[in-house]
């Protein structure tokens, strides 16, 4: 069946030119070239077939196979999508798309494709083998064994299924069963050196030295260029004290490693050294004639850079090869020049690409590549891109991208065009714009940010902001209505930045109001800065300018902006000066709001609190009045019914308390209510019990911590008063 779908053309002369209008002829030659390990040439034939017959699913299917062989997974998926649109029942197109999706990191999509393919063709052993390979790569070895077993039941003479099941059992430390599978695979395919090599590994794990040496020897008889067999046998010989023979095998393995793969083989051999791949890609241009252009980006913008890179490698850009890179002492950093150095002892080698998931506040995280190498071609110009997340003593600091091109104007244009697209993506900042952010500090003592954290704050509606009407109107005029008039203010040449100071006793709703503003200013990015993070203020302001319109919130600003005469060290004054400089340094047309909060306005430095242009409006958050306390009781009672007499008593007995105290009072009252029986309305005795516990059972410290009152307790706070 697979041969029919692929239109395999065994015996086709690769040099025969198909008739100009013969789409099937191009497909036949393309399949022959693909079978002959020439996927690049095969793609050209399948391109011709697609142009001649855009409705032929076979052309897209086979071009997808060729692109998969080249490592061009994104375009391969696109071809398989089109093949399936034209022929939805093509189970093999689903299985190949699953393989491409796995290489792209979309394992859930890969499993969905394999499951659908198996449902369409439940008798196809190769589909179970494909899904088994995916399970194996995810280290679910027993599930992989189950799929390989199903494949063997369907095709008892499938040597590859036995070999694959043996590898899964070997990985699961079931060496006896693995040896049995490899032995059966050898019986079915006795000329395959790889199977002897695998059985040698399993026998070595089972401590069968004699059988191991025999298998290494047979593998080398069948394939004298199998370097891994020399290396493995050398290890056994060393353990047996046969050092001269071991040294000879090590030398042979090194000599084979140094042999250069040629042409297309270099592009498809996954174990080849990277310097060989790069030189092959740029032939006939010598590597010494290349030029490398580098840009370094802050680590915090890696999500937007990843999205830009993903988009850049589509359209007219062809990905010839993609891989991860590993070199010893990775922590010292790797540059493109390092990949070109031929190092016999510690070469840069191909590894699977490694990603990290970055939360940007959406339904799914952004998968960001940690390092990777692309070999590419656009408009006839070959170039390479190397991406590396550079770390310093284990802490990520920056993201470096290098573009290697030929040293000529077309090469320069390719590099500049690529970097221009990256810069545009960073300026758009789509990953974080309009969200609520703070910089994460890592575990190291430097305190520098290691990333951007996206907060999901509780959504606060206007009717949940319990403030005096005059205060609420002052707030909305200076924030919400001011923001709405920014374009007209800017047209008059007036400043569009503003600084506000919220002050009042603890628990009066300053933070709660900030949550409301974050929801009421659509399109604004809110940056939350705690006092201990003011040392990162320059980074925060870089983000604020990039993501404007933005709101910069600094809570408890008195901790770093108190009067200079009360400061204990020069470090405190440095932080204050940094804050003042950032507020002064904004352009008048900057669309940035500063919102500062404090419980102690009298302690603030006059240069901050008394100068317009830094703080333009001070807003007091008073303790709630009688009407405010009634609204707060209703708000925080949530789903409980509060009778009017209980409401009046609660309001009367909470004079002088904060909003946060009433919130805790209602929670504590609900607990007493539920402990009593939980039925009916909230009772006065529930509120009285809660007040007694909050105000008296915990002593004066408890009252102070919970915002029970400002001075000494009065009669109004006494239960039963």
Image (spheres, helix red, strand yellow):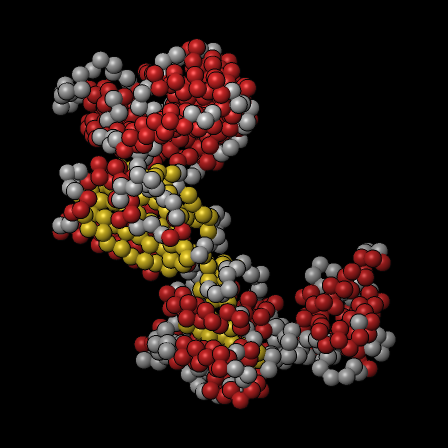
The image shows residue 68 at horizontal and vertical percentages of: 32, 31
Answer with left or right where residue 92 lies relative to residue 285: right
Answer with left or right where residue 166 lies relative to residue 67: right
Answer with left or right where residue 614 lies relative to residue 38: right
- Kindly identify the residue that appears in the image at 31 percent across and 20 percent down: 224
- Kindly identify the residue that appears in the image at 61 percent across and 67 percent down: 464
The image shows residue 359 at horizontal and vertical percentages of: 48, 52
- Kindly identify the residue that appears in the image at 43 percent across and 68 percent down: 540
Q: Can you see residue 48? A: yes
Q: Nearer the viewer, residue 593 or 366?
A: 366
Q: Can you see residue 74? A: no
Q: Nearer the viewer, residue 140 or 89?
A: 140
Q: Is residue 316 above or below residue 599?
A: above
The image shows residue 279 at horizontal and vertical percentages of: 22, 39
Q: Quadrant of the N terminus?
A: top left
The image quadrant of residue 23 is top left
Answer with left or right where residue 279 lies relative to residue 390: left
Q: Is residue 188 above or below residue 674?
A: above
- Kindly identify the residue that appears in the image at 71 percent across and 70 percent down: 662
Q: How many marks?
A: 0
The image quadrant of residue 470 is bottom right
Q: Quadrant of the C terminus?
A: bottom right
The image shows residue 634 at horizontal and vertical percentages of: 70, 67
The image quadrant of residue 680 is bottom right
Q: Is residue 328 above or below residue 701?
A: above
């Amino acid at each position: 069946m697979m041969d029919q779908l692929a239109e395999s053309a065994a015996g086709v002369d690769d040099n025969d030119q198909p008739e100009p209008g013969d789409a099937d002829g191009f497909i036949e030659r393309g399949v022959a070239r693909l079978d002959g390990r020439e996927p690049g040439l095969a793609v050209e034939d399948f391109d011709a077939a697609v142009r001649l017959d855009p409705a032929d699913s076979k052309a897209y299917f086979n071009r997808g196979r060729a692109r998969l062989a080249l490592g061009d997974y994104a375009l391969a998926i696109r071809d398989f999508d089109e093949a399936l649109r034209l022929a939805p029942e093509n189970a093999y197109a689903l299985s190949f798309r699953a393989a491409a999706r796995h290489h792209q990191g979309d394992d859930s999509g890969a499993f969905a494709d394999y499951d659908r393919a198996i449902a369409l063709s439940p008798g196809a052993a190769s589909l179970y083998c494909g899904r088994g390979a995916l399970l194996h790569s995810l280290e679910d070895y027993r599930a992989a064994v189950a799929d390989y077993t199903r494949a063997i039941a369907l095709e008892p003479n499938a040597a590859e299924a036995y070999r694959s099941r043996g590898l899964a059992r070997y990985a699961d430390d079931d060496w006896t069963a693995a040896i049995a599978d490899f032995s059966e695979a050898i019986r079915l395919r006795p000329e395959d050196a790889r199977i002897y090599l695998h059985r040698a590994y399993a026998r070595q794990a089972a401590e069968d030295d004699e059988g191991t040496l025999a298998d290494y020897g047979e593998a080398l008889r069948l394939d004298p260029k199998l370097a891994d067999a020399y290396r493995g046998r050398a290890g056994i010989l060393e353990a047996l004290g046969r050092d001269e023979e071991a040294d000879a095998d090590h030398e042979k393995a090194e000599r084979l490693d140094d042999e250069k793969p040629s042409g297309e083989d270099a592009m498809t051999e996954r174990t080849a050294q990277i310097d060989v791949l790069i030189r092959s890609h740029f032939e006939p241009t010598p590597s010494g004639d290349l030029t490398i252009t580098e840009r370094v980006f802050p680590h915090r913008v890696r999500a937007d850079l990843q999205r830009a890179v993903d988009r850049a490698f589509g359209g007219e850009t062809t990905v010839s090869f993609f891989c991860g890179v590993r070199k010893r002492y990775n922590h010292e950093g790797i540059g493109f020049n390092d990949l070109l150095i031929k190092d016999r002892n510690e070469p840069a080698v191909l590894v699977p690409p490694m990603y990290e998931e970055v939360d940007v506040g959406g339904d799914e995280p952004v998968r960001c590549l940690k390092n990777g190498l692309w070999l590419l071609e656009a408009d006839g110009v070959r170039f390479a891109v190397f991406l590396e997340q550079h770390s310093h003593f284990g802490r990520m600091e920056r993201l470096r991208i290098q573009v290697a091109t030929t040293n000529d104007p077309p090469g320069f244009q390719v590099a500049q065009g690529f970097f221009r697209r990256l810069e545009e993506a960073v300026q758009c900042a789509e990953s974080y714009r309009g969200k609520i952010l703070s910089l994460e500090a890592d575990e190291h003592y430097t305190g520098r940010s290691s990333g951007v954290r996206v907060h999901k704050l509780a959504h606060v509606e206007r009717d949940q902001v319990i403030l005096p009407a005059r205060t609420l109107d002052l707030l909305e005029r200076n924030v919400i209505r001011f923001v709405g008039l920014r374009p007209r203010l800017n047209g008059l040449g007036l400043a569009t930045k503003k600084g506000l100071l919220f002050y009042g006793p603890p628990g009066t709703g300053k933070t709660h109001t900030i949550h409301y503003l974050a929801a009421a200013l659509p399109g604004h990015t809110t940056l939350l800065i705690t006092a201990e993070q003011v040392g990162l203020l320059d980074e925060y302001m870089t983000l604020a300018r990039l993501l404007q319109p933005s709101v910069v919130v600094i809570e408890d600003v008195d901790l770093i902006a108190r009067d200079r005469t009360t400061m204990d060290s020069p470090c405190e004054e440095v932080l204050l000066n940094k804050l003042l400089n950032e507020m002064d340094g904004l352009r008048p047309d900057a669309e940035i709001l500063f919102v500062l909060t404090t419980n102690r306005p009298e302690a603030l430095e006059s240069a901050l609190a008394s100068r317009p242009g830094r703080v333009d409006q001070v807003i007091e958050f008073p303790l709630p009045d009688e009407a405010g306390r009634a609204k707060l009781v209703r708000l925080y009672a949530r789903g409980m019914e509060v009778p009017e007499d209980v409401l009046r008593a609660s309001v009367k007995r909470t004079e002088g308390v904060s909003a946060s105290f009433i919130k805790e009072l209602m929670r504590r009252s609900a607990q007493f209510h539920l402990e009593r029986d939980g039925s009916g309305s909230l009772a006065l005795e529930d509120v009285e019990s809660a007040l007694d516990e909050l105000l008296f059972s915990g002593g004066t410290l408890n009252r102070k911590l919970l915002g029970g009152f400002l001075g000494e307790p009065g009669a109004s706070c006494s239960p039963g008063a």
